[in-house]
Image (tube, helix red, strand yellow):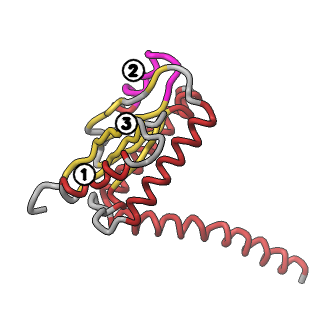
Amino acid sequence: MRMSWMALLAGAAVLSGCVPLVAGAGGAAMVGAAQERGLEQAVDDNEIAFEINRKLLAKDSSLYRGVSTQVQKGRVLLTGTVPKAEDRVAVTRIVWSIGGVKEVINELNVGESGGFTQSMSDTSISTKLRTRLLGDKNVSSINYSIETVRGTVYLMGTAINQAELDRVVAHARDISGVRNVVSYVEVRKSGN
């Protein structure tokens, strides 16, 4: 009898560990389906991002820690900081070696990272911008990726029209601590 209770508890523990995975996968599928790029493209982009991270980690853990990637429709935006100029080239080569990559946008800085205070400031900027976009009924916020590095906000995604993109950029520029806004957002063509 004691053995069956232990087996039951072990089984419950194993199953409870699966709930976040199932819910996470379901949530990701719902987000991908709602985005302008669609579920299939979102899955492809996630696979590309996973493979970039896997290869960076295998090459050098400092590259993995220093590089952030955003992938939209096979376009890869690289942001962050790497120690040497040669590392920028190495990261770009790694990304181009991955199937499905259509464009590599290398915005990597060379040198020392900004440290904890800068990292917290950048995270705060990205969070504030995400909150503003969520609260703006004239912006389809789900279509935008945001990364902030040393006060520069990098935007990627698909805008429904130029007016929406202009609103997003204006929101970003209005946040304290933002030094620059760089947009790699595509504007959806009319009639789509």
Query: Residue drawn 53% across and 27% down?
Result: 59
Query: Residue drawn 37% across and 25% down?
Result: 93
Spot the residue most to the left: 191
Spot the residue most to the right: 2
Circle 3 or circle 2, nearest the eye? 3
* Quadrant (top left, top right, bottom left, bottom right) of the C terminus: bottom left
Number of numbered discs on residues: 3
Magenta residues?
Answer: 81-94
Q: Residue 74 is drawn in which quadrant? A: top left
Circle 1 or circle 2, nearest the eye? 1
Secondary structure character of the magenta stretch overall: helix
What's the residue type where badge 2 is placed? Val
For mark 1, what is the residue? Answer: 166
Q: Earlier in the sequence, mark 1 or mark 3?
A: 1
For mark 2, what is the residue? Answer: 89
Report how far apart the C-alphas of labels 3 and 2 lie in the structure: 24 Å
Secondary structure of the residue carrying tag 1 is: helix
Q: Earlier in the sequence, mark 1 or mark 2?
A: 2
Vertically, is 92 above or below 10?
above
Give the camera-side residue of 58 and 155: 155
Q: Are marks 3 and 2 in contact (CB under 8 Å)?
A: no
